[in-house]
Image (cartoon, rainbow, N blue to C red):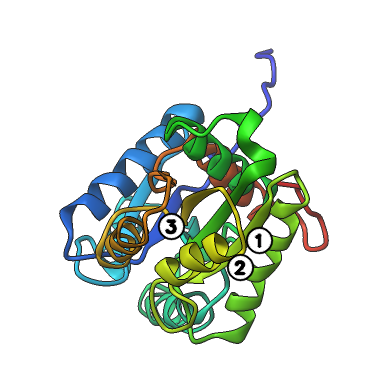
């Protein structure tokens, strides 16, 4: 009699990282580097990338390719730092469209990345890489420079991140926005100077380069910030956070992973 072996475990559903997209080629290059590192950190997990605008493949194109390969379950993860318009409207709309077209493909949507302590850790990493020393922390004001949103919930999240981050020992942490809301990065740099802050650092709260991150860079230089950190990019903390959001999306409702 042949021994009975248990069936092999089902393959993990592919992860589709959904980025905003940009005409700037640096944006796609940075997103692809991040997703490559995510795939490298989880051998055996299929990781694909799609974009809402400007860059191929689009979300429908990426999901059609998964369906053509026989995939029946996938996790779509918005590469967004807050739950603003894209997370609330654009991504759900395109996923509904694809679900109607491909009823055999079940799509689970992961949560957006922020807020999360891992994002603050990534910001700290980028400031250190830009030359900021920990011993200067108490004398340094930080501008948390986000892309910006018309969504009041998203702006409130950024303000909350700034308040919590300030409690870790910075002289001050203030939010700023590159578009859709005020104040601008250069205005906050000057405000901190007027308040007597000796050293001012700008920490872009954005994942990839592009039009709005370039505006943050210009504002920082125009106002004479002492330290300008690079974008978050493919920081190890983001790699870990994407995998946590993926794992969280696969848990039963009500379970949470602290990120």
| Residue under label 2 | 158
Residue 111 visible in the displayed image: no
Q: Which residue is drawn at 26% across and 54% down?
A: 27
Q: Which residue is drawn at 66% across and 76% down?
A: 156
Residue 35 spot, x, y in % from top left: 38, 42
Residue 46 spot, x, y in % from top left: 41, 40
Residue 36 visible in the displayed image: yes
**Against 100, is 188 above or below?**
above
SS of the residue under disc 3: loop
Q: Which of marks 1 and 3 is nearer the N terminus?
A: 1
Quick check: marks 2 and 1 in contact, CB under 8 Å? Answer: yes
| Residue under label 3 | 206
| Residue under label 1 | 162
SS of the residue under disc 2: helix
Quadrant of the rendered image containing residue 61:
bottom left
Q: Which residue is drawn at 21% across and 50% down?
A: 26
């Amino acid at each position: 009699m042949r021994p009975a072996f248990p069936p092999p475990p089902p393959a993990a559903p592919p992860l589709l990282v959904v980025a905003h997209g940009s005409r700037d080629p640096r944006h796609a290059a940075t997103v692809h580097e991040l997703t490559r590192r995510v795939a490298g950190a989880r051998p055996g997990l299929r990781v694909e990338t799609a974009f809402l605008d400007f860059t191929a493949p689009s979300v429908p194109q990426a999901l059609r390719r998964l369906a053509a390969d026989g995939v029946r379950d996938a996790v779509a993860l918005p590469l967004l730092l807050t739950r603003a318009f894209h997370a609330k409207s654009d991504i759900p709309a395109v996923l509904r469209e694809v679900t109607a077209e491909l009823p055999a493909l079940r799509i689970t949507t992961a949560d957006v990345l922020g807020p999360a302590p891992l994002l603050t850790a990534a910001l700290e990493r980028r400031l250190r890489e830009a030359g900021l020393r920990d011993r200067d922390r108490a004398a340094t004001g930080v501008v948390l420079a986000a892309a910006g949103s018309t969504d009041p919930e998203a702006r409130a999240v950024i303000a909350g991140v700034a308040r919590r981050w300030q409690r870790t020992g910075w002289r001050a942490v203030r939010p700023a926005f590159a578009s859709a809301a005020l104040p601008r990065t250069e205005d906050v740099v000057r405000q901190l100077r007027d308040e007597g802050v000796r050293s001012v650092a700008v920490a872009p709260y954005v994942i990839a380069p592009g039009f709005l991150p370039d505006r943050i860079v210009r504002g920082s230089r125009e106002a004479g910030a002492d330290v300008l950190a690079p974008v978050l990019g493919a920081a190890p903390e983001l790699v870990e956070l994407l995998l946590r959001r993926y794992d969280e999306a696969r848990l039963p409702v009500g379970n949470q992973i602290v990120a």
